[in-house]
Image (spheres, grey):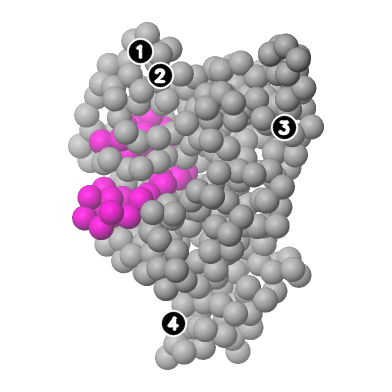
């Protein structure tokens, strides 16, 4: 069989993997993960909430709640149950992926550096009690100034790898690279949602503002030799995903993984370190004031970061209420 006909027989998902992009499953539903053989998986409070409501995961939820009954007060028990639940789902996911899982720190701590560090260390401690090495876990933090500085300390002092999420602005990406974080999750679909609502325009993948944002960040990192890797996130369609083929990692929902698996479109490599070298970006450095100013200049990013934190916090609160009912 010629290499061309072999390529044609490959699904778009297989071709995407062949560009060098590591495919990550964006879900807490570990049964849905195994089918697509992703390397890593990511979770967040919204995804854990969705999975926790599924009948097949009742035993995971019940076990976390049973362990938490050791807490002195109801509030302590709820916090313990939440931590154990996030780690229990993560540990189950690690049985079906060979790489890493991302587990999120409570979004309500997004503006408190010290509390984010404390929570991250606690989650890693719980993983280690389950026999999971910290090298297999990425701690997800919001890309606020405080979250980025928490990550700087977790990486440099404790060797805890971080995934900086809710990333919408170039300022956030620059600050993350300078902090030496392991990985960032710049959002694609949510950026497109914002501009679509504002302009009423339908975007092609090539002109999609979310795709352009991730491309700019990827090129900047590669051109200036940063070690932080880029994992595009929050996709609305397969076009956005394929327009970022070659990106270090892409985290994709099971629904879109299914579509890519059934698609046989050609997937040319869109991003590469070589192409990045030819771009004309200038390296910048940001202190706190510089970060806040540059981020503030991006109206979409300010709105989407605040909205994202509120949404994750609301879903965490809903999950807490479910747990509270089970504890009483």
State which region is magenta: 149-178
Q: Nearer the viewer, residue 295 or 42?
A: 42
Residue 76 can be seen, yes or no: yes
Quarter of the image with the C terminus is bottom right
Kind of element beneath mark 2: helix
Q: Is residue 246 left or right of residue 13?
A: left
Q: Residue at x 54, y 17 (%)?
A: 270
Between marks 4 and 1 in the image, the one whose residue lies nearer the viewer: 1
Kind of element beneath mark 1: helix
Q: Is residue 51 left or right of residue 221?
A: right
* Residue 155 belongs to magenta span: yes
Q: Is residue 153 left or right of residue 248?
A: left
Q: CA distance from mark 2 to mark 3?
A: 24 Å
Which of the two labelled residues, at mark 4 and mark 2, occupies the earlier sequence position? 4
Which of the two labelled residues, at mark 3 and mark 1, occupies the earlier sequence position? 3
Q: Which mark is residue 260?
A: 3
Mark 2 surroundings within 10 Å by alpha-carbon count, few (fewer than 14), some (14 through 19), many (20 or more):
some
Mark 1 surroundings within 10 Å by alpha-carbon count, few (fewer than 14), some (14 through 19), many (20 or more):
some
Q: CA distance from mark 4 to mark 1?
A: 51 Å
Q: CA distance from mark 3 to mark 1?
A: 30 Å
Q: Nearer the viewer, residue 124 or 75?
A: 124
Which of the two labelled residues, at mark 2 and mark 3, occupies the earlier sequence position? 3
Q: CA distance from mark 4 to mark 2?
A: 47 Å
| Residue on which the image places disc 4 | 76
Q: Are marks 4 and 2 in contact (CB under 8 Å)?
A: no
Residue 205 can be seen, yes or no: no
Q: Residue at x 24, y 24 (%)?
A: 284
| Residue on which the image places disc 1 | 277
| Residue on which the image places disc 2 | 273
């Amino acid at each position: 069989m010629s290499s061309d006909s072999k390529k044609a027989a490959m699904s778009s998902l297989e071709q995407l993997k062949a560009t060098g992009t590591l495919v990550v499953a964006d879900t807490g539903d570990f049964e849905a993960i195994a089918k697509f053989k992703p390397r890593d998986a990511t979770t967040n409070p919204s995804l854990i909430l969705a999975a926790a409501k599924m009948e097949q995961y009742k035993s995971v939820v019940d076990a976390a709640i049973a362990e938490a009954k050791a807490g002195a007060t109801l509030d302590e028990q709820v916090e313990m149950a939440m931590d154990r639940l996030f780690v229990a789902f993560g540990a189950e996911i690690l049985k079906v992926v060979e790489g890493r899982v991302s587990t999120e720190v409570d979004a309500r701590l997004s503006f408190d550096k010290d509390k984010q560090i404390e929570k991250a260390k606690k989650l890693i401690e719980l993983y280690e009690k389950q026999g999971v090495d910290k090298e297999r876990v990425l701690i997800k933090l919001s890309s606020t100034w405080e979250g980025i500085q928490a990550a700087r300390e977790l990486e440099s002092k404790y060797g805890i790898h971080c995934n900086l999420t809710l990333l919408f602005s170039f300022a956030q990406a620059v600050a993350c690279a300078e902090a030496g974080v392991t990985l960032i999750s710049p959002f694609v679909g949510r950026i497109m949602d914002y501009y679509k609502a504002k302009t009423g325009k339908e975007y092609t993948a090539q002109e999609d503002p979310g795709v352009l944002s991730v491309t700019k960040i990827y090129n900047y990192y590669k051109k200036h030799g940063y070690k932080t890797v880029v994992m595009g996130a929050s996709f609305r369609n397969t076009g956005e995903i394929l327009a970022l083929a070659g990106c270090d990692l892409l985290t994709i929902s099971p629904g879109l993984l299914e579509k890519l698996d059934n698609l046989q479109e050609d997937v040319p490599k869109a991003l590469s370190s070589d192409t990045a070298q030819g771009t004309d970006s200038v390296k910048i450095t940001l202190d706190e004031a510089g970060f806040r100013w540059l981020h503030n200049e991006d109206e979409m990013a300010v709105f989407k970061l605040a909205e994202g934190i509120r949404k994750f916090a609301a879903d965490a609160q809903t999950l807490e209420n479910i747990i509270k009912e089970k504890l009483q």
